[in-house]
Each structure stands twice: as structure tokens, then as C-alpha cells.
Image (cartoon, rainbow, N blue to C red):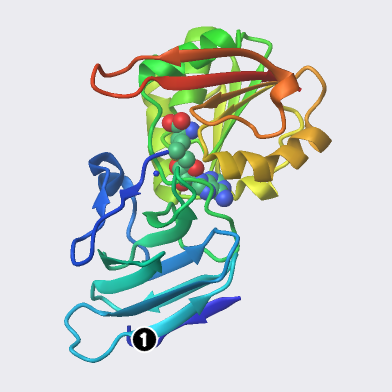
Amino acid sequence: MVGFVAAAWFLVVSPSTQGTNPRPNPDINAQVEKQEELTIRNITHETVRYRIKPSSSVSDPVRMTIHMGDIDMFPGNESMDVSFQRGTETISYRLDVGMPYSFRYDENDELELYEGSHGRDDAPDLAPFVPTPMVVVEKMLEMVRVNRNDILYDLGCGDGRIVILAAKKYGARGVGIDIDPQRIEEANAAAREAGVENLVEFRRQDVFKVDFSEATVIALYLLEESNELLRPLFDRFLQPGTRVVSHNYPVPGWKEKEMEFASVKVEDDEEPHDVYLYLR
Ligand SMILES: C[S@@+](CC[C@H](N)C(=O)[O-])C[C@H]1O[C@@H](n2cnc3c(N)ncnc32)[C@H](O)[C@@H]1O
């Protein structure tokens, strides 16, 4: 169900205290594309209550109730002030015009409002666009032993970097899927620049509407709960022997299929990036 109110990252928006803005990861803020309306999605397992009003308005905020899986849309060209309860604490954010947001759980299983990837109501928001650092892409391709006989699918391909490097360095064919048209444009331009257009294809599609059964390699950089949503499709449609390589987030329920794990240091002051390799 979609709610309308008239007049109105792995890695996302950080928690803030009342009265301050969400503190987006700068990389993500630069990449998330504006859409026609500000959207708030509920990806938690509970009904969430929140209050919202245009930032300039002096009237009381509107009380909203959003059920799990639903999306509320707020047309208009003004930023919005939103607040919700987390235990006894009131969390308040100022949300940007035309941007997608999602209620999710944080690493402590607490309610949090994050930036999303898109505000479409016909496709799940699997993760905001955050590119995998190239050193991690190199490691993923090395671990998965990609070669010229492979067909690699990147589900949520972003700017296409994994598919493109697999083609350029190892001669693998590849298909990148992303819901965001800007990402597909970037990926096509990058493929031309790398001279691998004959080996790769980028499609603007919802991952859940794609037949990826021909893949011999699947690359992922999605949130853990998104990998969990995809696992039944992997179990059903991937051929036995397909390798699945995932940046930072495991595939829940696939522990016995895990073949290799690596931790890659990218920046000295950052947590290392994890890479999981599975054999379907
Ligand atoms: C974290 S980025 C990963 C980009 C790339 N795979 C990489 O590792 O650099 C996740 C991508 O998933 C895309 N995405 C989110 N939900 C999607 C969906 N339902 N179908 C297709 N793509 C989706 C986002 O637009 C975003 O570009």
C-alpha cells in the first residue's frame, strides 16, 4: 500500500539527536538521485509511527503510521522535518526534497531512518548506491577465480565496476542490473571507456524481476536483509556450482556453503571490508 500526504547506504544516514539533520555519508549523499517526491519506506518488521511537516511550516506535524513493507510519498519541493520515538528518545531529522529514505534497523537492532536507493513502490530498496572500493573489487574477482568462460551477474551493479573489471582483466561476460537509470548510464559509459561493450550488458531492472539462472558467478554488495530476501531465489534458480561473492554482508542461512572469507583493509582509519565466497 502506498500512502500519500498532500502538500507536502552498506553505510547510510547516521543517527542524530533531536534537532539535528541526518548525517549522510558524504559519498552517498553525492550519489543518491533526486526523485519526484520524498519517500519514506518501512523495511522493518514492525509498524512505525512518526510525525512529519514541511520545514518552514509552523503548524503541528502530521502523525503518520506506516506498516511494514509500505511506502509513504510526499510530493512538494520543500525539505521535511520528521521525528519518531526510539525507546524514550525522540529522534528528529531534516529530510531533503525528493530523496528516498527507509526505516531500517541499525547494527544494534534499533529503529533508524536511512537514505535509500529509490522511492519506487514496485521494487524493494535493496541498498543505497555505495561503490565497492576497487581494491575490494580486485579481491572479489580473485577469490571467485573469474575467467573467460564465466557469465557474471552483479545484482545492484551501481556504476558497473565489478562487471567491467571482470570483462577487462579476465575476459568474462557480464550482466549488471540496477534499478537506478543514472547508474545504468554511468555503467554503459564506463564500459565504452574500458572497451568492453562487446562483453557486458547493463539493464535497468528490479533484481527480483530478472532471470539470472545463466550466471556462473553472482556478485553482491547489498544489505544483509536483502541477501536474505534473495537467498530463496538463489536456492531455486542458480545452477549447482555457481559461485556467489558478496562484499561486506553474508548470505544468511548459507553458512555451510561458505568456501572462503577475506578481510581487506582499504583505509587505515576504517574497518576492513569483508568478502564472502559461497558455492551454490
Ligand atoms: C551498494 S550499491 C552496490 C553497487 C555495486 N555492486 C558495487 O559493488 O560497486 C547497491 C546498488 O543496488 C541498487 N538497487 C537497490 N535496490 C535495487 C533493486 N530492487 N533492483 C536493482 N537494483 C537495486 C542501487 O541502486 C545501488 O546502485
Outermost residue, bottom direction? 59
Q: Quadrant of the N terminus?
A: bottom right
Q: Is residue 81 left or right of residue 279?
A: left
Taking depth in this image into account, of 164 and 62 the one nearest to the observer is: 62
| 142 in relation to 112, above or below | above
Taking depth in this image into account, of 273 and 84 the one nearest to the observer is: 84
Kindly identify the residue that appears in the image at 44 percent across and 59 percent down.
102
Q: Position of residue 17 (x, y in %)?
A: 23, 59
- Figure label count: 1
Taking depth in this image into account, of 135 and 45 the one nearest to the observer is: 45
Looking at the picture, which amino acid does disc 1 mark? Val
**Does residue 36 appear anywhere in the picture?**
no
- The residue that disc 1 covers is 62
| 58 in relation to 279, above or below | below
Q: Position of residue 267 (x, y in %)?
A: 26, 19
* Mark 1 burial class by Cα count in 10 Å: few <14, some 14-19, many 20+: few
Kindly identify the residue that appears in the image at 63 percent across and 9 percent down.
148
| 212 in relation to 271, above or below | below
Outermost residue, front direction? 88
Kindly identify the residue that appears in the image at 24 percent across and 72 percent down.
79
